[in-house]
Amino acid sequence: MQRRIFGAAATATVFGLLVPLSGCGSSAGDAGDSGTLRLVAAEYGDSPANSSKAFWDKVTKDFTAANPGIKVQVQLLPWADIDREVSRMVKAGNAPDMALMGSYSDFAAQGKLYSAEELLSISAEANFLQPLAEAGSVGNTLYGLPFVASSRLLFYNDTLFRQAGITNAPKTWSDLTADAKALKEKGVKYPVALPLGPEEAHAEAMIWELSNGGGYADNSGNYSLASDQNISTFRWLKEKLVTPGLTGPTPPSQLNRADAFAAFLRGEVGMVNGYPSLLHEARAKGMTVNAVPMPVSDTLGAGETPPTVGVADWMMAFKQNGKGAEIGKFLDFVYQDKNLSDFAGRYHLLPSTVSASRTPSGGGLDRNDEQFLTALRGAQLYPVNDPSWVTVSDTIKRNIGHAVDANGDAKAVLEGIAAKAAEAGRKKG
């Protein structure tokens, strides 16, 4: 989910991430051995103390103990680098056996990946939560195996709400606007944080678009980036929230998600869209906060329940080395409830399977996470099964915030993004 990262250089220095992390004595020299699997995985930790290394060391050791003929190397890379590095490996003819990262469809389109059917039992394939399985499929074939996920809800600082005389969570955009005005009158720095900076603007934008009946794709799965609903969403944001100064001193196009979250944890933000780990961090600081479904536009009305945004990371298996049988055994092991719940619990994320999401033991879900799991079951994910999504999402991240700039034109900005998406689609085609 591309959120817990150091700078690339700092991470590599602290964790030694460019050196393979081995299970059961495997070493860099084993990479070509028929009995050794290579997994390149994103680093989820944000400090040496919670590096993903501890998880993978234990899992690979336990797996090799149960399968003495198969060793596993795990190489951790920063989120900022992993897409580029795995792509480089594949192009150089040195694909890893598996990768855990934020996209998969480009490799699937090139015919580089095993399908889930070739690796997993029928019961294991059917165990993935439905919205995640759909997002991991190209056509009707599952290539991106969802690993961990999160959903997005609207967070609000209950203390600031009470100080502003607000007694109920907002259910419509009009409610949200009224609450933001009340918070501003009490001197709250960011009544509603709107992080449309390049770090994760594609998530924030989609949250607002869905709550107005829009989104990135139409019912046929085609991009609808400049739809009437989306244009009206950004015109509303600019007119009702940004121009009146209800989004704080930093222009939304310059406000990154990490900065908005940090301000929320300092008590400077009244409302912000967030995911499970933010709730845990806030409550660990003693803050009284709540998370509720995103308010809907007045056009839709309070009775409507559009989908929330879901985000997932993907495990994929490459065909290049012909190790499908060994990969299947390892994935069966990793996706056991105890292992998947352990990983998800370490980072306050949601496990991707039905059975693990029902298993609170082993570091999995707690009561605070249940509402996010409920939202995830009906969530809409990014169109990650489109091979052009990596390019399209980068275009969205770098441009969509300008739709609410002081001199920004929502229609022109969204049509520009749509044109670049169409060009990216033609190149992938």
Image (cartoon, rainbow, N blue to C red):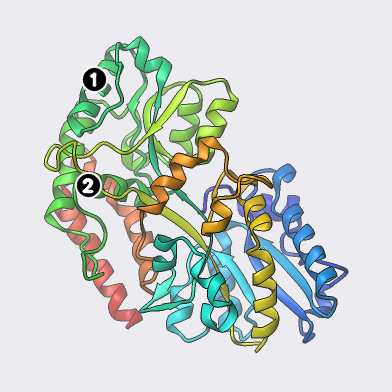
Q: Residue at image x 22%, y 47%?
A: 403
User: Position of 291 compared to 55: left or right?
Assistant: left
User: In the depicted view, which residue is nearer to us: 320 or 414?
Assistant: 320
Q: How far apart, in angstroms, are the residues tagged by discs 1 and 2? A: 22 Å
Given this view, does label 1 or label 2 mark the residue nearer the observer? 1
Q: Position of residue 397 (x, y in %)?
A: 36, 53
Q: Secondary structure at mark 2?
A: helix
Crowding around mark 2 (Cα neighbors within 10 Å: few <14, some 14 to 19, many 20+) is many
Q: Which residue is mark 1?
A: 181
User: In the depicted view, which residue is nearer to us: 57 or 412?
Assistant: 57
Q: Which residue is mark 2?
A: 403
* N-terminal label among 1 and 2: 1
Q: Position of residue 394 (x, y in %)?
A: 38, 60
Q: Residue at image x 29%, y 46%?
A: 401
Crowding around mark 1 (Cα neighbors within 10 Å: few <14, some 14 to 19, many 20+) is many
396 vs 243: above or below: below
Q: Secondary structure at mark 1?
A: helix
